[in-house]
Image (cartoon, rainbow, N blue to C red):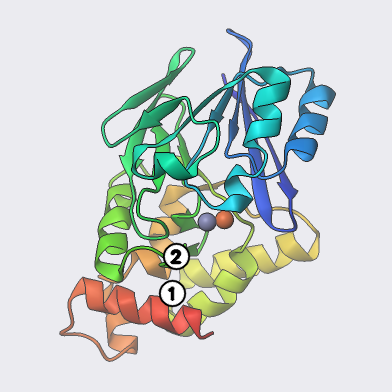
């Protein structure tokens, strides 16, 4: 079984460390902050062997070079933005498999937040590391690609097994929940998750990881094809891409 350590740094970035006791390998999903990650590694007695980068933004790559210098770890990340990622050793694209001990992680390209963004999915471990593509009750802002491409990217994640545990780049769930109920007010599963999120954050607890099945039932950005949301927005006849674009636009202005 993989061991996972999740903590917050840089105010709202999740750091996620994955440790395989069989092989002794430890991967960091992105590298928001080298010092914070180093401290947790020391505390756990783990040696960093890999960094799995999702996209080029500084809040995900700032710690790469310092960690590489310290541990000599290998850095894998998206081929589509390889020139923007310091220290990259291996560039990955759609269909590539990153093997981590006995666990394979499939690489999916999810353009939208950035043009070359990738996510890592292990069917065997039941894990999805989604970076800034999918958040709990939200999705990444569309900085480098448009809504149609992002809707396609999210479609790939909707096809993954519901029991997959979602880990993502940021603890944004509380503000996402407060927005989500405005576009999908009659969704009981969403109301329940929103109440849970309010309680978790009030107690300073994290809202991730969460099973994808919960996101499928509650995350409006995965549900642009949902009749109740479309009716609420008065967009019954619009395309899914247009409904998604409208939800994204409302969130940007929320
Ligand atoms: Zn980002
Ligand atoms: Fe980010």
Instruction: Count every numbered label the image shows and give the total.
Output: 2
Query: Residue tagged by mark 1?
Result: 187
Query: Residue tagged by mark 2?
Result: 218
The residue at the point 69 percent across, 29 percent down is 67
Between the C-alphas of marks 2 and 1, the distance is 7 Å
Q: Nearer the viewer, residue 34 or 243?
A: 34
Q: Vertically, is 60 above or below 225?
A: above
| Dots 2, 1 in contact, CB < 8 A | yes
Q: Vertically, is 1 above or below 116?
A: above
The residue at the point 63 percent across, 39 percent down is 31
Sort mark 1 into few (<14), some (14-19) or many (20+) by Cα contacts within 10 Å.
Answer: some
Quarter of the rendered structure image containing ligand 2? bottom right
Left or right: 2 with respect to 188?
A: right
The residue at the point 24 percent across, 67 percent down is 148
Residue 223, by quadrant, is: bottom left
Instruction: Pick the quarter of the image with the C terminus.
Output: bottom right
Q: Of the residues under marks 2 and 1, which one precedes in the sequence? A: 1
Secondary structure of the residue carrying tag 2 is: helix
Q: Position of residue 42 (x, y in %)?
A: 82, 23
């Amino acid at each position: 079984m993989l061991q996972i350590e999740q903590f917050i740094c840089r105010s709202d970035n999740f750091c996620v460390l994955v440790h395989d006791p069989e092989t002794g390998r430890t991967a960091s999903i992105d590298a928001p902050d080298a010092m914070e990650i180093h401290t947790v590694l020391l505390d756990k007695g783990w040696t960093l062997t890999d960094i799995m980068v999702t996209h080029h933004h500084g809040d995900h790559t700032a710690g790469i070079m310092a960690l590489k210098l310290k541990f000599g770890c290998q850095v894998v990340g998206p081929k589509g933005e390889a020139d923007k990622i310091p220290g990259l050793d291996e560039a990955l694209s759609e269909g590539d498999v990153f093997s981590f001990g006995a666990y394979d992680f499939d690489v999916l390209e999810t353009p939208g937040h950035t043009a070359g963004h990738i996510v890592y999915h292990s069917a065997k471990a039941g894990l999805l590391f989604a970076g800034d593509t999918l958040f709990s009750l939200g999705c990444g802002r569309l900085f480098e690609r448009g809504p149609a491409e992002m809707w396609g990217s999210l479609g790939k994640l909707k096809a993954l097994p519901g029991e997959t545990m979602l880990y993502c780049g940021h603890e944004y769930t509380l503000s996402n929940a407060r927005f989500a109920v405005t576009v999908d007010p009659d969704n009981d599963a969403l109301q329940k998750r929103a109440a849970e999120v309010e309680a978790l954050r009030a107690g300073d607890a994290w809202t991730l990881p969460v099973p994808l099945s919960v996101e499928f039932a509650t995350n409006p950005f995965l549900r642009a094809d949902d009749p109740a949301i479309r009716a609420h927005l008065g967009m019954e006849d619009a395309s899914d891409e247009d409904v998604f674009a409208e939800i994204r636009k409302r969130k940007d202005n929320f």
